Image: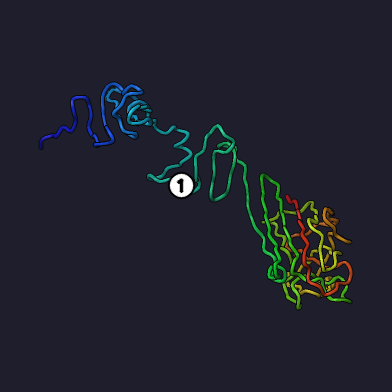
Amino acid sequence: MRTIDLHTADGVMVRAPGHGILLSYGTIVPTSGASGYATGCNFIHTDGGAGTAFYINEGSGTSCSFVAVAAMTAAQEALLGAVAGTATASVAAILDANKALDVVRTASLMVGASGSELAVILADMVAGTGVSTGTSTVCEHRVTKVGGLFKTEIFLDITGLNDGGNGVTGAVVGKDAATVNCHVGQILAAVNGTIVAGRMSCLLTPATGHADIDLFTANEGTLAQDTAIGDATANVKIVDGATWATGDVIALTALPPADDHLVLAMGSGGGDADYSAGLFLIELWGV
């Protein structure tokens, strides 16, 4: 078989009309500022060495600027954890090692310098349907764990929930018509840790319904709206709301145990009214 030499005397192997040289070779890298080399042109440095054997033009066709294309460092290859030519799923990205974040793991999120990563856990909670199905009601959760500290946040817009009928002491707050499953979330050790502190804040004063709202824990997550919280198993008042107003912050007087549900109930008799406003933030810290 005869070898076919595809090049010119000056080392040009591929040239595109209207663009310039696309592939070239030689013992001397083209001088910066030279013309005729298309942007992206590859240059093979025939007497180059490690890190100087292959170049690419990052300049323009009228003023070239060839930059050496270096191989990956050993540290970068180690971060990829390449197996059979593919990156392992546990390491999703390589970032600048000089920055604070250089490892992102998808199975268990880790942040920090390689070798000194800090565990980060992100989780969610679910409100009962007696709260989540209220008209215009919002109950959203965010749970994070950085290092050994859990932080649980529950944002609650009670618009659309009912404050319970007259004559019911400690009526459970939820969607009207005795809707069941009136809780704003369940505490789980694996998700929230062991709760060691907490507080409840009023971001917007409740309107239409009574503002005397307390926070309880109870074993059951099935409690119906307008039933008495006193009938719940192992119910404990952890926030005595008195009369909430924007800006009020009340620390927990007791701590919710694992597996219990968080329930809103009236501190006084309700008026069987649906709330037209009322924003709250419940914050819990766990270990």
Q: Residue at the location (83% across, 60% down)?
A: 238
Q: Residue at the location (70% across, 70% down)?
A: 135
Q: Quadrant of residue 203?
A: bottom right
Determine if residue 71 is in view: yes
Q: Position of residue 184 (x, y in %)?
A: 73, 64
Quarter containing the N terminus: top left
Q: Note whether 21 is above or below 213 in the view shown.
A: above
Q: Quadrant of residue 190?
A: bottom right
Determine if residue 200 is in view: no
Q: Residue at the location (35% across, 23% down)?
A: 33
Q: Position of residue 58 (x, y in %)?
A: 38, 31
Q: Note whether 115 is above or below 279 in the view shown.
A: above
Q: Residue furthest bottom?
A: 177
Q: Position of residue 13 (x, y in %)?
A: 22, 32
Q: Note whether 221 is above or below 22 in the view shown.
A: below
Identity of the amino acid at label 1?
Answer: Thr
Q: Is 267 on the left-hand or right-hand side of 194?
A: right
How many discs appear?
1
Q: Position of residue 254 (x, y in %)?
A: 84, 57
Choose between 218 and 6: the one closer to the eye: 6
Q: Note whether 155 is above or below 228 in the view shown.
A: above
Choose between 227 and 85: the one closer to the eye: 227
Choose between 174 and 66: the one closer to the eye: 66
Label 1, on which residue? 88
Q: Quadrant of residue 100?
A: top right
